[in-house]
Amino acid sequence: MLSDLAATPDDRRLELSREFDAPRDLVWRALSDPYHLAQWWGPKGFTNPVCDIDLRPGGNWHHVMRGPDGRDYPSDSVFIEVSPPERIVYRNAASTDPVFADNPPPSFVRVITLIDLGGSRTRLTLEAFFDTAANRDAVVRRGFREGVMQSFDKLADHLGTEGGPA
């Protein structure tokens, strides 16, 4: 399955990237430790009151993002590949929760890659692979790009605080 991702047409793929002023091991910890992940995951104004991770191939990730309006958005994913400290591959389950009304997020594969740039800098790349172009377009309309970039802003803040991963 992972080898098939490279052949994914551009209309079924998204890539977002950001560089951080932090060593790769520190960024990895912020991604893999549920306490730290809960501090920054999600768009601006969202919190994560629930973040349970079994970080291994076949392991589950259950989290609940709480929006600024107090509404909870549950999400479940399964890890496909975990290669510390450089790569995590997972697929979210399609949601049927009524909170999403007529616009539930589709299931798709995400590949997170951390590249050590040297000098205590890391590039985080998130690639998203969709089963159809329509699913990709639906996620874009839902604000996926903006939400991920806001998450990356929150991660940068978290990595730069005393409360960041130690």
Image: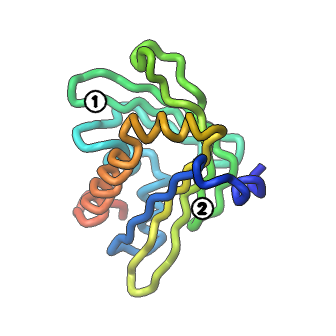
Say whether residue 35 is visible: no
Residue at 33% across, 74% down: 21
122, 5: nearer the viewer: 5
Quadrant position of the C terminus in the picture? bottom left
For the residue pair 34 and 11, the one nearer the viewer reads as 11
Residue 108 is drawn in which quadrant? top right
Residue 1 is left or right of residue 128, and the answer is: right
The quadrant holding residue 73 is top left
Q: Classify mark 1: helix, strand or loop.
A: loop
Q: Position of residue 165 (x, y in %)?
A: 36, 61
As drawn, is 57 to the left or to the right of 13?
A: right
Q: Residue at x 49, y 29 (%)?
A: 105
Q: Which residue occupies 34% across, 54% down?
A: 149
Q: Amino acid at mark 1?
A: Gly
- Mark 1 lies on residue: 67
Mark 1 is surrounded, within 10 Å at the Cα level, by few (under 14), some (14 to 19) or many (20 or more) other residues, namely some
